[in-house]
Image (spheres, helix red, strand yellow):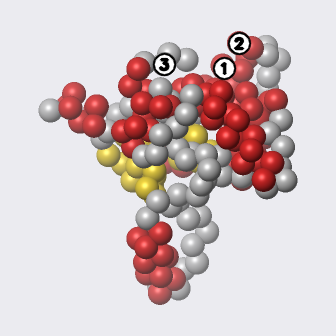
Amino acid sequence: MPNTPSRTPTARAAQAGPPVPDVAQALQLAHAYCQERGESLTPLRQKVLSLLLQSGRATKAYTLLDEMRKIHPGSAPPTVYRALDFLQSVGLVHRIESINAFTVCHDLTHCRHGILIVCQSCGAVAEIDAPGVHHALVDKIESTGFTLVRGELELKGLCAECAAKAA
């Protein structure tokens, strides 16, 4: 996966939220995060997380599978999907349903964010932790008689880099 300077995890996060450390440091944080919760970041889960960190943007599962096959030729879709399911369940990874892709949480010490902003041009993702906005929206939803099943809100936009190119 190419890693242009503006799409590294650290550069992306500097544009869009708290700084994300380099891949090795991020994996250490992820290990600690899992251990605190009694979970295990197995070598396979770690590799999938590492590939997502290296991509620096929202990445589709089959792209991750292609990258895994370069390292482990026998990798099959269920292998990657199980790892993604785990990473998502503990909050280290967000699934962006609108584009059927995954991205690493920008803050590996506080892995719960309610609002994701996705660049519709390059796939960069920013996260907003705005509990007040989120709670107000949930209240409005519940006032309609609906029960919120999934709490992340996805918004589309252009990141600063793509907006500058479009101008």
Q: Given the image, on which type of amino acid does mark 3 rest?
A: Asn
Question: Is residue 14 toward the left or the right of residue 82 in the image?
Answer: left
Against 109, residue 73 (above or below) is: above
Q: Given the image, on which type of amino acid does mark 2 rest?
A: Lys
Q: Given the image, on which type of amino acid does mark 1 rest?
A: Asp
Residue annotated with mark 1: 66
Of the 4 image quadrants, the one containing the N terminus is top right
Residue 43 location (% of width, % of height): 82, 29
| Disc 1 packing (10 Å; few <14; some 14–19; many ≥20) | some
Against 87, residue 153 (above or below) is: below
Residue 17 location (% of width, % of height): 42, 46
Instruction: Verify CB contact (< 8 Å) between mark 1 and mark 2.
Output: yes
Residue, x 36% and y 39% (percent of image)? 15
Of the 4 image quadrants, the one containing the C terminus is top left
Residue annotated with mark 3: 3
Residue annotated with mark 2: 70
For mark 1, give the secondary structure. Answer: helix
Which residue lies most toward the left here? 167
Separation of residues labelled 3 and 1 (CA atoms)? 16 Å
| Disc 3 packing (10 Å; few <14; some 14–19; many ≥20) | few
For mark 2, give the secondary structure. Answer: helix
Question: Is residue 95 toward the left or the right of residue 77 in the image?
Answer: left
Separation of residues labelled 1 and 2 (CA atoms)? 7 Å
